[in-house]
Amino acid sequence: MGSAYLQEGLVDHALKHFRKSLQIKKALLGENHVWLTPILNALGKAYYRQGAFSEAIEQHEACLRIRRDEYGEENVSVADSYQRLGA
């Protein structure tokens, strides 16, 4: 639902749903599970669209850290995280 709101330009609504999703997933999976990375990226994208660049960087860095821990440095998902931070 958050992605749909983001597509419509309703960033505040998107953030609300992304945060709720992250809260639920962290409760079920723990703080550093690789399945958190899509929602962290979505949050980063939403914060970026809102102009909240520090928050966007924070989310993308969290995603990168989890992916590096899970996959190591030489991985396509890790490279994608670096790209998001550099975009």
Image (cartoon, helix red, strand yellow):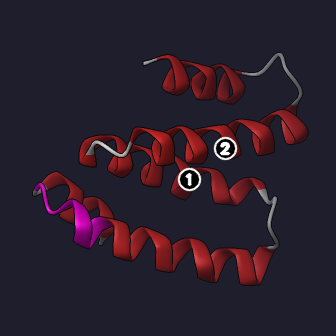
Above or below, 1 relative to 68: below
Q: Main secondary structure of the magenta part?
A: helix
Taking the magenta stretch, the answer to whether it contains residue 63 is: no
The image shows a total of numbered marks equal to: 2
Q: Residue drawn 71% across and 26% down?
A: 78
Determine whether 72 is above or below 29 in the image: above
Which disc number belongs to residue 63? Answer: 2
Q: In terms of secondary structure, where does tag 2 sit?
A: helix
Quarter of the view holding residue 45: top left
Amino acid type, residue under disc 1 in the picture: Leu
Could you say where residue 87 lies in the image, as x and y percent from the top left?
Answer: 42, 18
Dot 1 lies on which element? helix
Q: Residues within 10 Å of mark 2 (few under 14, many from 20)?
A: many
Report the amino acid beneath label 2.
Cys
From this view, report whether residue 42 is shown above or below residue 13. above
Where residue 63 appears, as percent x and y from the top left, is: 66, 44
> Which residue is identified by label 1?
40
Magenta residue span: 9-14
Vertical position of residue 33 compared to residue 62: above or below = below
* Contact between labelled residues 2 and 1, with CB atoms less than 8 Å apart: yes
User: In the visual, does 17 lie left or right of 58?
Assistant: left
**76 with respect to 6 (left or right):** right
Residue 32 location, x and y as percent? 81, 59
Please state if 20 lies on the left or on the right of 12 as rendered: right
**Label 1: how many residues lie within 10 Å, few (<14), some (14-19) or many (20+)?**
many
The quarter in which the N terminus is drawn is: bottom left
Say the numbered circle drawn on residue 77. none
